[in-house]
Amino acid sequence: MDVSKLLAGRTAYMRSSEIRELLKWVTADVISFGGGMPDPSTFPTEDIAKITAYVLETYGGKALQYGPTDGVPELKEELAKFAESNGIKASSDNIIVTVGSQEALELLGRLFLDESSVVITENPTYIAALQSWRVYRPRLVGIPMDDHGMRTDVLEEQVKRLRAEGAKIKFIYTVPTAQNPTGVTLPDERRRHLLEVAERYDLLVVEDDPYGYFIFDNTVVTRLKAMDKSGRVIYLSTASKIFSPGLRLGWVIAEPEIIRWFALGKQALNLNTPTLNQYMLAEGLRRGVIQRNIPNIVSLYKRKRDAMLAALETYMPKGVAWTRPSGGMFIWVRVPEKIDTKEMLQDAVTKYKVAYVPGHGFFVDENPPRNTMRLNFTYSSFEQIDEGIRRLANAIKERI
């Protein structure tokens, strides 16, 4: 049976994730800088085991039952306290718990996007956000970046132009802190300017903040949601990097009216986020397991970032450039223009036994640059970082 004849037209706009496809054919002997995976040593395994036993003993059938669509009250209370420790004022009414922040991105598409919509993003931007939204066929407008993040001067010009055209701008999407894929961080001055633009043109801002907990080099930034004076910032975050990605837990902080719409959209997706996992995260926050662990993660990831930067400096040939991330998990690399990193990937994996994510998929352009790649520095060991960058450099030298 030819199922393709029965598929909805929107499936033509579904694209497989470059990262997920890459992970399928990376074998054990390949050093992979491809995924966005945390170092497993950062998972508080013993604490999670104790918490699981406590939750089952204390909450029993309640933890194994269906739960409220917007999240169990105990977790929402703890998340409000956690948000406050990061400068964000929120109550339970401002929070919905999601299946990772990825579900929140899908819900944004369901709630706000159609073919007449415009979404403004950094360019390049988070590949899975683009994957979530393209099925709704919005117009994606990319704002160029420099070493300090989104060029908010260009943002203002683009918003002014789009409004003059009568475009329906739904929101500005940004990963302002330790951005994925570049690793750069938007300074507070630009954050204020971004919010001024949103205020002037009455726009929503979606702040995606998976990496704001991992800032290096004494960099100090204020979350956009903490600066938000008019309730226009929709804040997304996740427990995947600070507790466990396997629990698939994220949350949204926004105005109660927006949260109600998120809950309505979520009902048709999965009824509620797994209840047992929510109680586990609530207890992890209540006991301070997460809060105590974050400084240890920061210390480890900073050393790994420094190791990869040192290896890049040692092995890479002339003509290769890279970012110096202020935090997070990624380094963005640009190779000479004649090299197509997607074409090079197969040789890199099969011949040199090293993997990365080609950069073209992170751009909103129809004809994106082909000479970029994203490297993850958190998952591999220090020895693998040095050896993997040496192998990658050799693959690049062969192409040059």
Image (spheres, rainbow, N blue to C red):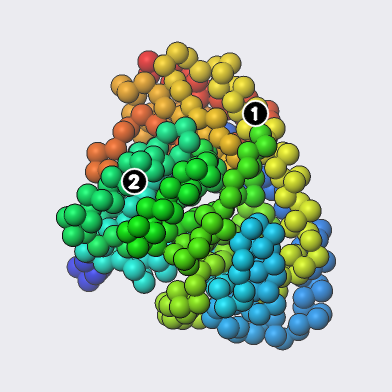
Q: In which quadrant is the N terminus drawn? A: bottom left
Q: Position of residue 378 (x, y in %)?
A: 63, 40
Nearer to us: label 2 or label 1: 2
Q: Amino acid at mark 2?
A: Leu
The residue that appears at 36% across and 29% down in the rendered structure is 371
The residue that appears at 28% across and 45% down in the rendered structure is 157
Q: Amino acid at mark 1?
A: Asp
> What residue is pinned by disc 2?
155
Is residue 53 visible in the rendered structure shown here?
yes
The residue that appears at 22% across and 49% down in the rendered structure is 161
**Alpha carbon of mark 2 to alpha carbon of mark 1: how far?**
32 Å
| Quadrant of the image occupied by residue 385 | top right
Is residue 135 visible in the rendered structure shown here?
no
The residue that appears at 75% across and 46% down in the rendered structure is 295
**Reading the chain from its start, which is encountered first: label 2 or label 1?**
2
Q: Position of residue 171 (x, y in %)?
A: 36, 60
Query: In the image, which disc is placed on residue 360?
Result: none
> What residue is pinned by disc 1?
306
Q: Position of residue 345 (x, y in %)?
A: 41, 32
Viewed as shown, does residue 121 lie left or right of 136? Answer: right
Tell me the element at label 2.
helix
Examine the rendered structure and indicate whether residue 356 appears above or below residue 309.
below
Q: Position of residue 205 (x, y in %)?
A: 42, 59
Q: Residue furthest left?
A: 165
Q: In which quadrant is the C terminus drawn? A: top left
Query: 10 Å neighbourhood of mark 2: few (<14), some, or many (≥20)?
Result: many
